[in-house]
Amino acid sequence: MGLRQFPPKSLRQRVLVVEDELIIGAIAAEALMDAGYEVFTAASAEEAEILLRDVSVDVLFTDIDLGGEDGFELAQAALSLQPLLSVVFTSGRSRICHGLCESVGVSFLAKPYRLTELLETVERAVKATSTQ
């Protein structure tokens, strides 16, 4: 397998992965890094908000149910800090969440998802951010 070349960090799109199930978050983050994204991770909404105060991201990829915390509230806080970012929600409760997300114009990825689906969804979110 050949050497992978990525753009310099300053030119890469940045994704924040927020997932309270650490293994799922690590797998998603690794897939995104392998695809050339600069990835930040957080295991809670509180941790994500702290990070978002210091780091600009292009896409917030967050679980909706963060172990008692709410991914929707996190997205609101993130958008108040960084109004141009795109939000992608994920959840195992797909029937309810998919309709709600579509109604407010954000992306949704049902769990369990394939890594190819994750990459396609994040790529669409990045493109949406770059056209704003």
Image: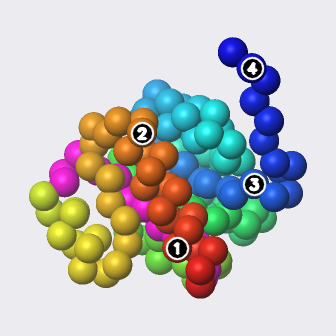
Q: Classify mark 3: residues with Cα within 10 Å, few (<14), some (14-19) or many (20+).
A: some
Ranked by sequence position, the earlier of labels 2 and 3 is: 3
Identify the mark nearer the N-term, 1 or 3.
3
What is the C-alpha distance between the residues marked 4 and 1? 31 Å
Q: Is residue 78 visible?
A: no
Q: Quadrant of the C terminus?
A: bottom right
| Residues at marks 3 and 4, CA–CA distance in whole angstroms | 20 Å
In the picture, measured across the screen, residue 4 lies left or right of residue 129, that is: right
Give the residue number, with chain letter if any, for mark 2.
116
Decide: few, some or many residues near mark 2? Use Cα within 10 Å; few <14, some 14-19, many ≥20: few
Say whether residue 2 is left or right of residue 29: right
Figure quadrant of the N terminus: top right
The residue that label 1 is drawn on is 128
3D distance between C-alphas at marks 1 and 3: 15 Å
* Disc 3 versus disc 4: nearer the observer: 4
Q: In terms of image quadrants, where is residue 82?
A: bottom right
Q: Which span is picked out in magenta?
A: 83-94
- Which residue was labeled with disc 3? 12
The color scheme shown is: rainbow
Point 32% across, 53% down: residue: 109
Relative to 98, is 21 on the left or the right?
Answer: right
Counting residues from the start of the chain, the first of labels 2 and 1 encountered is 2
Disc 1: CA contacts within 10 A as few (<14), some (14-19) or many (>=20)? some
Tell me which label, 4 or 1, sits earlier in the chain: 4
Name the secondary structure under disc 1.
Answer: helix
Residue under pointer 4: 2
Residues 7 and 2: in front is: 2
Image quadrant where residue 29 sits = top right
CB of mark 1 within 8 Å of CB of mark 3?
Answer: no
Could you say where residue 65 lies in the image, as x and y percent from the top left?
32, 53
